[in-house]
Amino acid sequence: MTIPAPRTAHGTQYADAELTIYDVIEADADMGEEITQGAAEAKQAAADCEDLAEQLETLHTKVLALKVPGILATAVAKLIEKTAQVKARAEAIAEKIPAAAEAITTAGDNAAARHKPLADAVRDAGHTAPAERDYHNE
């Protein structure tokens, strides 16, 4: 049986600050960039799928022309279908990702606007986090 860590009056688990608003703002900016790069990668994956589908269709045509016995023609046809599915998913991801990047960036901007002035004042006073006093909430 594990015993949960004691919590402070404000519901935080730790008394010392391990994560600051600066870390959150920086992480949001980095995440927004990474997500945006993901859109470019998804677009490239869709283009690669299109190239692969063309090559598979050429192969399928050759297999049919050569009358290759067995299931090769069927297997190539299934690969063409799967390639089309992957392409459609990659295009859908590329279309939706910019909205996710914008949401993360907006969240970081909102956090900066709301919490950074207090964090700057606390840092200027030589502290990592504000003390738990009423006058800090004014």
Image: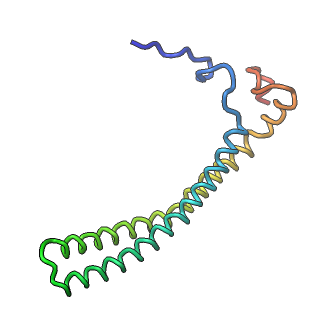
Q: Is residue 129 left or right of residue 90?
A: right
Viewer-nearest residue: 1 or 60: 60
> Which residue occupies the extreme right position in the image?
124
Viewer-nearest residue: 69 or 38: 69
**Quarter of the figure that contains the N terminus:** top left
The residue depicted at 34 percent of the width and 72 percent of the height is 84
**Relative to 61, residue 133 above or below:** above
| Residue 97 x/y as whole percent | 53, 61
The residue depicted at 15 percent of the width and 83 percent of the height is 67
The residue depicted at 58 percent of the width and 21 percent of the height is 13
| Residue 85 x/y as whole percent | 33, 68
> Which residue occupies the extreme left position in the image?
69
The residue depicted at 48 percent of the width and 16 percent of the height is 4
**Quarter of the figure that contains the C terminus:** top right
**Relative to 138, residue 93 above or below:** below
Q: Where on the picture, by quarter, is residue 134?
A: top right
Q: Where on the picture, by quarter, is residue 81?
A: bottom left
| Residue 62 x/y as whole percent | 25, 84
Which colour scheme appears in the figure?
rainbow
| Residue 47 x/y as whole percent | 46, 73
**Relative to 97, residue 127 above or below:** above
